[in-house]
């Protein structure tokens, strides 16, 4: 009987980092003639791993389907463009419904935050609006949140915006319950500014929220809240004077919290069981230098087993880190920050890698690239003067004129806007 159970037991994906991965598929965005400099900002696997939903610079969502000859192998995987859902305004954030699957159309949906619009629950198959959730300020203006997250039961939707978090019952569209995050008369602690990231712990009644306002010596910009009371229970991140761009808990070690910050190429980690005033570890990509100082949001990911952390860089590289070292109990209460070097770094794209995502079921990593580059055209710098410059008399007259330099507005270009699927399967 035990053999039968072992035969059908699920094993988390294993990632071989002893060598660079194999590139099994590359996908390009559907061309937009009105927006040739389009690129992907964020790309996420669907919970069943069958699709990729990408947030694009041209105010659209593009879907890609992953096809494989066998569910147990990725050597023949192919990522193909499927469809585009255009939006009326810039997209701020999106999140899949936790049990979304293309095989179950009822659950096949996602939530999107579009500027100056209510939060949208969209059907992933055709873009149909299923429900909307309104956040209205004191001037009766629609507020689009900068961060979205479902709780563990997928019954509540948490939306972060300026100085507050709005909590909605997913099954009851309309208005939600507002949770102010700013300091009050009772306490000087709180989160000021835009709530830029929300993440739920996998086993505790706890979620973390981060702010775009940099922390200071007297105010942290990461807080842990109790879901039951919606009261803050802990503050983190006083030592990092930067804006929070992403928070994530380790799926199998819920006491470990990871954070990315604006203009910081490293990922910070705290063990919530010990001293949270100082990060426990600093995951430092090999390419960490001044080129990493960018306002572009670089999204990292942790695999389902909680063993690997992946993050891209401005130089087109992807770095993977080993998280198994966090099982060492003697490091929980260390005062110094441990710098961790990547176990593998490889060139993934010819442009900045803004997003990476581990496949939920296979030993596969998705990487998305693209960023804005401004090139100045020297031919556009010309001087205009009156008269015919071929005539010497006109040249003499032109000496009294002020030459006007024609300036052209720099036009952004994209070096590499692509999606790559990498296989880390062991031979």
Image (cartoon, rainbow, N blue to C red):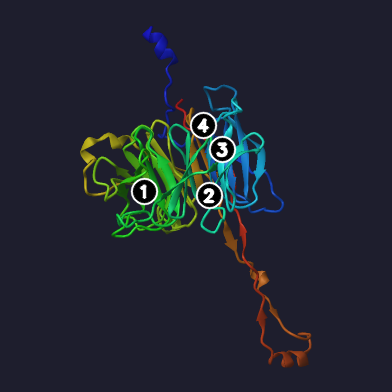
Q: Residue at x 47, y 32 (%)?
A: 424
Mark 1 lies on a secondary structure that is loop
Q: Secondary structure at mark 2?
A: loop
Q: Which x, y percent locates residue 216? A: 32, 60
Q: Nearer the viewer, mark 1 or mark 4?
A: 4
- State which tag comes first along the sequence, 2 or 1: 2
Sequence-first disc among 2 and 3: 3
Looking at the image, tell me whether mark 1 or mark 4 is earlier in sequence order: 4
Q: Which residue is mark 3?
A: 110
Measure the C-alpha gap from mark 4 to mark 3.
Answer: 11 Å
The count of marks equals 4
Give the residue pinned by disc 2: 135
Q: Which residue, given by chain and number where applicable, does mark 1 sit on?
A: 284
Q: CA distance from mark 2 to mark 3?
A: 18 Å
Mark drawn on residue 275:
none
**In the image shown, does 301 or 418 lie closer to the viewer?**
301
Q: Is residue 68 above or below residue 412?
A: above
User: What residue is rendered at 62% in x and 35% in y?
Assistant: 123
Callout 4 secondary element: loop
Which badge, 2 or 4, is on the more N-terminal residue? 4
């Amino acid at each position: 009987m035990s053999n039968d159970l072992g035969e059908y037991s699920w094993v988390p994906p294993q990632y071989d980092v002893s060598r660079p991965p194999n590139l099994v598929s590359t996908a390009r965005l559907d061309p937009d003639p009105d927006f040739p400099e389009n690129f992907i900002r964020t790309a996420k696997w669907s919970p069943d791993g069958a699709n990729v939903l990408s947030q694009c610079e041209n105010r659209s969502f593009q879907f890609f389907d992953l096809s494989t000859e066998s569910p147990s192998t990725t050597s023949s995987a192919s990522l193909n463009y499927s469809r585009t859902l255009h939006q009326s305004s810039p997209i701020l954030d999106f999140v899949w419904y936790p049990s979304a699957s293309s095989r179950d159309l009822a659950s096949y949906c996602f939530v999107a935050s579009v500027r100056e619009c209510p939060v949208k629950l969209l059907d992933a198959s055709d873009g149909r609006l299923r429900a909307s959730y309104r956040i209205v300020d004191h001037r009766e203006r629609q507020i689009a949140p900068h961060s979205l997250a479902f709780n563990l039961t997928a019954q509540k939707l948490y939306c972060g915006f300026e100085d507050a978090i709005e909590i909605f019952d997913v099954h009851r569209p309309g208005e939600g319950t507002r949770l102010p995050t700013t300091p009050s008369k009772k306490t000087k602690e709180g989160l000021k500014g835009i709530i830029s990231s929300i993440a739920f712990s996998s086993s505790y009644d706890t979620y973390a929220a981060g702010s775009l306002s940099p922390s200071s010596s007297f105010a942290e910009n990461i807080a842990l809240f109790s879901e039951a009371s919606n009261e803050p229970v802990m503050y983190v991140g006083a030592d990092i004077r930067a804006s929070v761009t992403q928070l994530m808990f380790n799926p199998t070690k819920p006491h470990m919290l990871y954070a990315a910050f604006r203009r910081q190429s490293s990922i910070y980690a705290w063990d919530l069981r010990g001293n949270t005033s100082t990060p426990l570890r600093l995951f430092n990509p090999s390419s960490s230098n001044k080129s990493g100082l960018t306002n572009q949001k670089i999204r990292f990911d942790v695999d389902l087993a909680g063993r690997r952390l992946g993050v891209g860089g401005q130089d087109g590289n992807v770095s993977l880190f080993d998280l198994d070292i966090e099982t060492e109990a003697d490091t929980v209460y260390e005062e110094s920050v441990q710098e961790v070097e990547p176990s593998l770094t490889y060139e993934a794209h010819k442009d900045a890698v803004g997003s990476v995502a581990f496949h939920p079921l296979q030993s596969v990593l998705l990487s998305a690239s693209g960023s804005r580059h401004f090139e100045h055209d020297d031919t556009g710098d010309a001087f205009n003067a009156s008269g015919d410059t071929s005539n010497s008399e006109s040249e003499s007259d032109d000496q009294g004129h002020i030459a006007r330099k024609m300036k052209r507005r720099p036009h952004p270009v994209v070096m590499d806007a692509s999606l790559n699927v990498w296989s880390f399967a062991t031979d």
